[in-house]
Image (cartoon, rainbow, N blue to C red):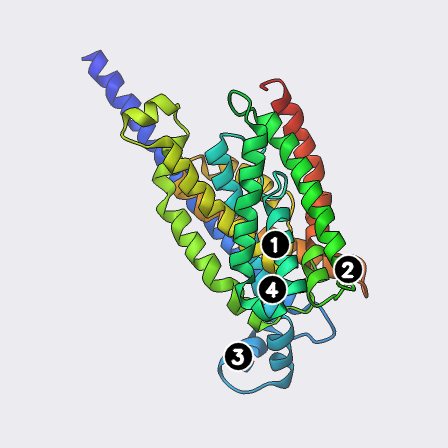
Amino acid sequence: MLRKLNQNELADADNKRMQSKRFWMVITYIVTVMLLCTLFLVSVNIGSLKVSFSELFSGLFVAYDSNVATIYDLRFPRIIISMLAGAAVAVSGVLFQAVLKNPLADPGIIGISSGAGLAAVCVTALAPSLYFFTPVVACVGGVIAFLLVYILSWKGGLSPLRIILTGIAVDALFTGLSSVVNSMSGGDRTGVASIVEGNITQKTWADVRTLLPYVFVGMLLALLSVRKCNLLALEDKTARSLGVNVNQTRIGISVIAVILASISTAVVGAISFLGLIVPHIGRLLVGSDHKKLIPFSALAGAVIFLLADTIGRTIARPYEVAAPVVMSVIGGPFFLVLLKRKHKEV
């Protein structure tokens, strides 16, 4: 009898813990969405033109307003691109960490972003008529960079530290080559330099239309891969016993991660550390289940990169600091702390 009561008490305690986790997860999502909406409105009003929420809503949906029209044409594309790129890079980081089983994996650190950036820079500088296909070419560059890092890191297996060190070397190589192409092209700020330097000041609705479909497809594929990402967290033998082709799954998820990182780099430039920071924050707040982690990382990535862009627009006014530079300043110390913690395990 006592044993049965103890079992019931344990079951009740487990139910209460699950309900508490669900409650706080819902609160976390709500707070993140509210932060994104608030930051959106703040970012809209940074500049000489300022509008209230009611004026913004009226100007967008009710009657023409010249101030709102100006904000819509000049600020909205930049804000939307920041959110899309932030979400894509953050989810890319989640996928890379799942594939490599390495909490230090990040598309910027392991050279994916710089490989994609070099491909995008070459298209912009050498064949500007093919600008619409820049994201596709960038994806090819990202895949090449990923394969190069993977091959050079292999030595009877993959060591997390070797991947990071090889990625840093590949990243430096491709970043240097991008700078060379930028110099040879005369430093066209609206084209090549905007990718090299991560400058999104002059982005337009055309850039939004270029980025949006690729991000949508990549996000959809990432959401469809949540179960496989969870299975990759298991030992390879265990995953195989469940009928999973581990190598094929890793390749498939890696391609999705490369797509998300590359399309963002093609429009925004290389973003360092965002794909490293957001997954760690996500695991602390919503857990390691990719069914919850991937959607949260998309929201949190949009918040953090939009925040970085907003800080960059205000911290040195009337001048601007590029959002990727702000992310590097924030993410550098974070990476060093994680690297120090991981060093003992490698």
Q: Amino acid at mark 2?
A: Met
Q: In terms of sequence position, does the residue under pointer 2 or pointer 1 come before the other?
A: 1
Q: CA distance from mark 2 to mark 1?
A: 15 Å
Label 2 near label 3: C-beta < 8 Å? no
Residue 60 is tagged as 3
Locate the C terminus by quadrant: top right
Q: Residues within 10 Å of mark 3 (few under 14, many from 20)?
A: some
Q: Secondary structure at mark 1?
A: helix
Task: Say which quarter of the image contains residue 197.
Answer: bottom right
Task: Tell me: residue 284, above or below residue 327.
Answer: above
Q: Amino acid at mark 4?
A: Ile
Q: Residues within 10 Å of mark 4 (few under 14, many from 20)?
A: many
Name which residue lies at 59% across and 69% down: 77
Q: Nearer the viewer, residue 24 or 227?
A: 227
Q: Position of residue 287 (x, y in %)?
A: 45, 35
Q: CA distance from mark 1 to mark 3?
A: 37 Å
Task: Tell me: residue 184, above or below residue 112.
Answer: below
Name which residue lies at 68% across and 36% down: 169
Q: CA distance from mark 2 to mark 4?
A: 31 Å
Q: Amino acid at mark 1?
A: Ala
Q: Which residue is mark 1?
A: 119
Residue 184 is tagged as 2
Q: Nearer the viewer, residue 249 or 8?
A: 249
Q: CA distance from mark 4 to mark 1?
A: 25 Å
Q: Secondary structure at mark 3?
A: helix
Q: Position of residue 341 (x, y in %)?
A: 63, 24
Q: Position of residue 171 (x, y in %)?
A: 67, 41
Residue 79 is tagged as 4
